[in-house]
Amino acid sequence: MRTPVIAGNWKLFKKQADAADLVTALIPLVKDAVGVEIVVAPVFTSLSAVREKIRGTNIKLSAQNCYWEEEGAFTGEIAPGMIKDAGCSHVIIGHSERRQYFGETNETVNKKIKAALKAGLVSLLCIGETLAQREAEKTFDILRSQVTDGLAGITAVELAAIIIAYEPVWAIGTGKTASDDQAQEAHAFIRGLVAELYDQATADAIRILYGGSVKPENVKGLMSRPDIDGALVGGASLKADSFAGIVNF
Ligand code: PEP
C-alpha cells in the first residue's frame, strides 16, 4: 500500500513573509487530510519561516535542490546536511528546470541523490521527456536513461528514501497536462523499469508522482490510475486553496 504524496514546488517565488502567509493559509485547509503525505518546497531563504509555521502540523518541508558535497570551497552551494539542519525531510533533485537552465545531468543528479541519502533526506527525483523527445518517440529511452543513470549504485533498501516524479517537460507550467492514459503509460513503464533494475517488491513499493499542470480539476482522474501515487505541483501550489484542492482530491 503506497501512501500518496502531494508536493508543492514553489520554485523562485515567495519571500519569507509571503511564504509564511501561504503556509499559514494552507494549514487549516489540509489539516484533516489523512492517508496523504503533504510536502512544500519553498526557496532556501524561506525554509526557516515556513518551518516555524508547520511545526506540529501534517505538512513536511522540502528544499528544491542541493549540492553533493557536505562542505568545502563551493561558493553558493548548499549541502544536504545543511538542508536537513534547516528542518527539511525532503529535497527535489533533477527538476527539468535545473536540467534545462543549470546544466544538471543524470550524473550530477545521481551524486546529489547519494549525498541526500547520506544526510537522511528523502529525494524527489524528477524525470521526464521534452516535447521533441516525445514526438521523436524517444520517451521511453529518455526515461530509461534518467532512471538507470540517476539511480546508479543505489540499493533497493536505499530506494525507500526515493520518490520518483514523472514530469513531462512539455506539461510543466504550460497548462497542458498529460492525459490520464499518457501519464499512466509512463508510470507503468517506470515501475516496470524499477522491477527490472531491482525486483518486483521494490517496484511495488516506490512512489511515482505525476507533475505537469496538475490542478484541482484534473487531479482525480490522474490519481485514479493504478501507478500514479501523487503529484508534484508547481503553479497550483502557490495558492492555498488550489493546493488544498489537490491535497483533498
Ligand atoms: C513543477 O514545477 O514541478 C510543475 C509540475 O509545475 P506546474 O505544476 O506549474 O506545471
Image: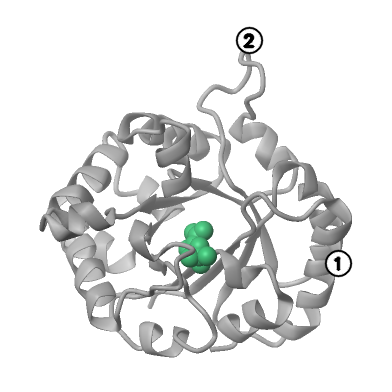
Judge by depth and name the residue closer to the eye, 170 or 249: 170
- Local crowd at mark 2 within 10 Å, few (<14), some, or many (≥20)? few
Q: Is label 2 in a helix, a strand or a loop?
A: loop
For residue 21, what is the image quadrant?
A: bottom right
Quarter of the image with the N terminus in it: bottom left
Numbered badge on residue 198: none
Judge by depth and name the residue closer to the eye, 87 or 239: 239
Residue identified by numbered label 1: 21
Q: Which residue is painted at 56% across and 65% down in the image?
A: 7
Q: Are marks 2 and 1 in contact (CB under 8 Å)?
A: no
Above or below, 112 against 229 in this view is above
Above or below, 96 against 22 in this view is above
Numbered badge on residue 73: 2
Q: Which residue is painted at 72% across and 76% down in the image?
A: 240
Q: Which residue is painted at 23% across and 64% down in the image?
A: 191
Q: Residue 108 placed where, x, y %?
A: 39, 29
Q: Is residue 136 visible?
A: yes
Mark 2: is the Cβ under 8 angstroms from ligand 1?
no
Q: How many marks?
A: 2
For residue 72, what is the image quadrant?
A: top right
Q: Residue 213 placed where, x, y %?
A: 47, 71
Label located before the other in sequence (2 or 1) = 1
